Image: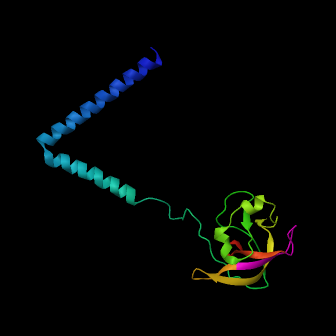
Amino acid sequence: MSNEDNSKKTIETAQAVVGNLVSSMMNLKEKNPKVFFGAVGGVVLLLIIMMMSGGDSKPSVSKYSAKSLSVGQQYVLKNPNALEEGATIRLVAMPGAIAAYDDEDDDKGGSPCKHLPEGTPVTVVDFQDAYGKKDAFVKVKVEDGECQGNEGWVLSIDVQ
């Protein structure tokens, strides 16, 4: 027998089993409806219990814990939302521009110090409130690397 013949025979057998099961369930429904609907209700109840319970008690996503930053202290840049190796942190001239930047400037020969790699040591210079959040932006001074001495604004969650 070929694989095609085996698969056809398996499908026919499965259809026969399902047909017998459906006919016996319909027969039970006609002869004893209380048992039939009780069994259906029990299966539904078990499915609901299985869907509502479960899962580990451990959280699957780690929550960022805000660090208390202070002016003059040295920290490193780290994006808590990035999973990619070699992720960079955007350094901008004004605090409100972080969400509205366009990378076209980088293609036109902009400053090479706009994207700093994670782990770059920085010193906090100033804070800026925004969107009802205290100290949402931090002005930092780069302490190491080819951009040493440059200052700019980053999101406060990126300074750890």
User: At 64% from the left edge and 65% from the top edge, which residue is drawn?
Assistant: 81
The quadrant holding residue 97 is bottom right
Q: Is residue 33 shown left or right of residue 122?
A: left
Q: Is residue 43 shown left or right of residue 141?
A: left
Q: Quadrant of the C terminus?
A: bottom right
Query: Is residue 160 in view from this perspective?
Result: no
Spot occupied by residue 28 in the image (x, y as percentages of width and height):
17, 40
The residue at the far top in this view is 1
Residue 139 in the image: above or below residue 101: below
* Magenta span contains residue 148: yes
Q: Quadrant of the N terminus?
A: top left
User: At 64% from the left edge and 69% from the top edge, which residue is drawn?
Assistant: 99
Spot occupied by residue 93 in the image (x, y as percentages of width and height):
75, 75
152 or 8, nearer to the observer: 152
Residue 78 in the image: above or below residue 34: below
From which residue to which does the magenta span run?
A: 138-149
Q: How many marks?
A: 0
* Magenta span contains residue 140: yes
Q: Is residue 109 shown left or right of residue 65?
A: right
Query: Is residue 23 in view from this perspective?
Result: yes
The quadrant holding residue 58 is bottom right
User: At 46% from the left edge and 15% from the top edge, which residue is drawn?
Assistant: 2
18 or 42, nearer to the observer: 18
